[in-house]
């Protein structure tokens, strides 16, 4: 007999739980929000898509909607708020609490992966997962693939077989984009197409290996939850029933599996709000599908569409340029951003004679801006690729200009941190073979062959920490016993997380000293900083999960201001700068082949994404925007060559920008941070002729 659940709402006087429209004071929201924001906040029933242009108060709108729902009587635990970073979720909840009260702390959500992790951990036994499963970060997932690759003998093929990183990319892309592996290989790695069948087989064995060893990678968190809804409908219905209001931030960055999950989360109550900007969809390389936001109105019938177009960040001049740029996109929600801010300077296009001139201009202009009262922390240089700033970094150091660079290494990617975490992972999950392999090879004399023998013993043993009993050479016996004793004693749970970490630290330091002797002091300082991070966590499970799901930037714990009262300026890739803003932004190396990438110029969809990337970069600027490129470029091993300015800068209306002409004057030494820099640049209206350099063929 079929059984169906019917949801009964509590009609008691609880502040309007079933219909939140009458519980909150509308005057407060009307006074704080513009008309479009207010409409988005107070539209609570059914499906809603909010297309929020850059700088239009997207976060404020989401925050106030959370506050509006709670003040209207909706229990906070009935609200699901999904974001793409833990920091964004925490910021929204803190701001929402300021609007209403601490009930906001009961809201469900966080990142997609973190919420999936929470649900899988909660229902693991019901869906056949090990309750103490380990979440693999990117590097550990690649190591696991390498183990499977070696076990299958693919490392000994006569013809070169793809390595672990390529395999990880292929398999992840296949899952996130829901494409056959053969198509992914054909599109991204055609030279490996002959191995498509073997890669498919390897992916199958990789899945089996993870399941057998209680391991989940990032993609598994999403697909396992999706499969929960598909294979356990009653359990899925129970989860959906508890989520009366679903809100998703940055919807343009979702992949196909995440879009499916949003549909499952909102399947019972149908109250789903997606907020995003199709013009800022720039993560296709991670599996994001910009069609998710474009197709949202079709996926959810009777969906209401609201556009946020009033910009609170940039000057009208910057918006005029960015509106023109993004309107060239083939597929989009048409919108026109506007600002009530006072008029400012036109965006500037700087064509430097060569890369050295570009670098010198930026460094000198930064010093001038600082003397004019612009704090260094309000200045950023953005680039397509992290390597594009190497020459500039040298110039900034020469002039004593402090900076921090983003788009670099994560804390958990540093070798010594990975070593340290491996011990903690084994304390939590003794079947984590990747961590066993890592810690065993830290022991003197233990190589891959010996480590593999110990791991095979551990897998078959009922007492995995008693590795001192493994039949091995006597030279390993003492070190194996010490390692086993340490892990066994710490796995009892009698010590706090801080005490556990300290014990691991004491054990690991001598090993680290031997392995990383040349820069041991720096790595030890990193570990000390890392112990401070660990002090913020209550238990090992939460620590490991959050570090895997939301790694901390290494620069975030290494960077210190040059002076106590002066924070550094920022260097960042455009992808890492999304969501941030600065008073002054320099965009460097605006060349064809760089932006747009040479790999995108033959594909319309990829070219549109590159255009969106430029739009994201330009809309980071609040007051001043400088778009720079060198006329002559240098490539090692080749003669200097004439560059081609980005095609995105061609045929810009003269009224939208001005040109800056670089005029060189001799000076004994370049200005530094401590000195005052005299202005050395001249501005000319767009279309004016530059008599210093022969650029008659340039599009400006």
Image: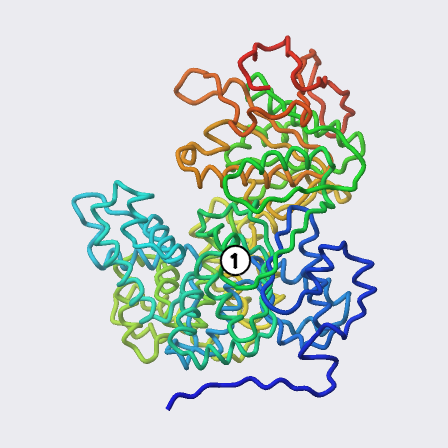
Q: Is residue 173 above or below residue 606?
A: below
Residue marked by disc 1: 296
Q: For the point 39% across and 88% down, which residue is it?
A: 2
Q: Is residue 283 above or below residue 654?
A: below
Q: Quadrant of residue 50?
A: bottom right
Marker count (numbered): 1
Give the image location of residue 494, x and y in percent.
53, 80
Q: For the point 57% across and 47% down, which residue is it?
A: 333
- Disc 1 is placed on an element classified as helix
Quadrant of the image for the N terminus? bottom left
Q: For the point 59% across and 69% down, which residue is it?
A: 271
For the residue carrying disc 1, how many other residues have a C-alpha within 10 Å: few (<14), some (14-19), or many (20+)?
A: some
Q: Nearer the viewer, residue 355 or 284?
A: 284
Q: Nearer the viewer, residue 118 or 184?
A: 184
Give the image location of residue 56, x and y in percent.
69, 49
Give the image location of residue 42, x and y in percent.
71, 65
The colour mode here is rainbow
Q: Nearer the viewer, residue 348 or 639?
A: 348
Quadrant of the image for the C terminus? top right
Q: Quadrant of residue 367?
A: top right
The reply, left or right, for residue 90 in relation to residue 160 is: right
């Amino acid at each position: 007999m079929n059984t169906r659940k019917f949801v009964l709402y509590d009609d008691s006087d609880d502040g309007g739980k079933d219909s939140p429209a009458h519980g909150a004071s509308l005057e407060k929201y009307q006074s704080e929000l513009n008309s479009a924001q207010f409409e988005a906040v107070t539209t609570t029933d059914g499906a809603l898509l909010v297309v929020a242009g850059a700088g239009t108060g997207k976060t404020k709108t989401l925050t106030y909607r959370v506050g509006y729902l709670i003040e209207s009587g909706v229990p906070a635990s009935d609200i699901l708020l999904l974001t793409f970073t833990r920091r964004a979720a925490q910021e929204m909840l803190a701001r929402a609490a300021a609007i209403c009260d601490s009930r906001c702390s009961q809201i469900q959500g966080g990142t997609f992966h973190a919420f999936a992790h929470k649900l899988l951990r909660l229902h693991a036994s019901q869906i056949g997962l090990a309750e103490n499963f380990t979440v693999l970060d990117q590097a550990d997932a690649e190591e696991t693939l390498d183990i499977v690759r070696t076990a299958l003998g693919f490392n000994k093929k006569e013809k070169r077989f793809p390595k672990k990183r390529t395999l990880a990319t292929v398999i992840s892309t296949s899952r996130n984009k829901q494409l056959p592996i053969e198509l992914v290989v054909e599109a991204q790695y055609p030279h490996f197409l002959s191995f498509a069948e073997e890669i498919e087989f390897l992916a199958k064995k990789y899945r089996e290996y993870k399941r057998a060893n209680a391991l989940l990678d990032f993609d598994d968190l999403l697909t396992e939850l999706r499969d929960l809804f598909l294979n356990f409908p009653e359990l899925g219905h129970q989860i959906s029933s508890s989520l009366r209001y679903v809100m998703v931030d940055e919807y343009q960055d979702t992949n196909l599996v995440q879009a499916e999950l949003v549909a499952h989360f909102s399947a019972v109550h149908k109250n789903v709000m997606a907020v995003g900007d199709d013009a800022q969809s720039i993560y296709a390389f991670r599996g994001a599908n910009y069609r998710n936001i474009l197709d949202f109105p079709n996926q959810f019938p009777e969906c209401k569409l609201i556009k946020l177009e009033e910009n609170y960040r940039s000057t009208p001049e910057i918006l005029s340029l960015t509106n023109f740029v993004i309107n060239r996109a083939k597929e989009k929600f048409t919108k026109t951003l506007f600002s009530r801010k006072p008029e400012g300077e036109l965006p500037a296009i700087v064509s430097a004679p060569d890369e050295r001139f570009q670098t010198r201009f930026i460094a000198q202009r930064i010093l001038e801006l600082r003397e004019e009262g612009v704090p260094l922390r309000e200045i950023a240089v953005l680039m397509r690729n992290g390597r594009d700033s190497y020459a500039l970094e040298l110039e900034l150091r020469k002039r004593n200009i402090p900076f921090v660079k983003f788009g670099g290494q994560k804390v958990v990617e540093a070798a010594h941190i990975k070593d340290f975490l491996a011990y903690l992972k084994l304390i939590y999950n003794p079947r984590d073979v990747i961590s066993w392999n890592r810690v065993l090879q830290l022991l003197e004399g233990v190589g891959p062959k010996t480590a593999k023998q110990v791991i095979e013993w551990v897998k078959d043993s009922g007492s995995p920490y008693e590795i001192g009993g493994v039949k091995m050479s006597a030279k390993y016996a003492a070190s194996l016993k010490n390692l086993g004793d340490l892990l066994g004693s710490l796995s009892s749970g009698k010590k706090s997380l801080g005490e556990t970490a300290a014990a691991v630290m004491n054990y690991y330091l001598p090993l680290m000293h031997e392995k990383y002797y040349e820069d041991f002091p720096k790595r030890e300082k990193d570990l000390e900083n890392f112990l401070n991070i660990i002090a913020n966590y209550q238990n090992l499970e939460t620590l490991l999960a959050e570090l895997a799901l939301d790694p901390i930037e290494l620069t975030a714990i290494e960077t210190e201001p040059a002076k106590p009262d002066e924070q550094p300026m920022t260097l960042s890739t455009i992808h890492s700068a999304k969501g941030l803003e600065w008073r002054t932004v320099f965009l460097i190396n605006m060349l064809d082949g760089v932006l747009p990438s040479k790999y995108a110029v033959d594909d319309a969809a990829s070219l549109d994404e590159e255009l969106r990337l430029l739009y994201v970069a330009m809309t980071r600027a609040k007051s001043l925007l400088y778009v720079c490129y060198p006329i002559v470029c240098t490539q090692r091993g080749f003669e200097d060559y004439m560059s081609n300015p980005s095609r995105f800068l061609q045929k810009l209306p003269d009224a939208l920008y001005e040109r800056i002409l670089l005029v060189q004057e001799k000076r004994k030494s370049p200005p530094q941070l401590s000195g005052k820099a005299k202005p050395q640049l001249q501005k000319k209206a767009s279309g004016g002729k530059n008599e210093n350099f022969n650029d008659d063929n340039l599009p400006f």
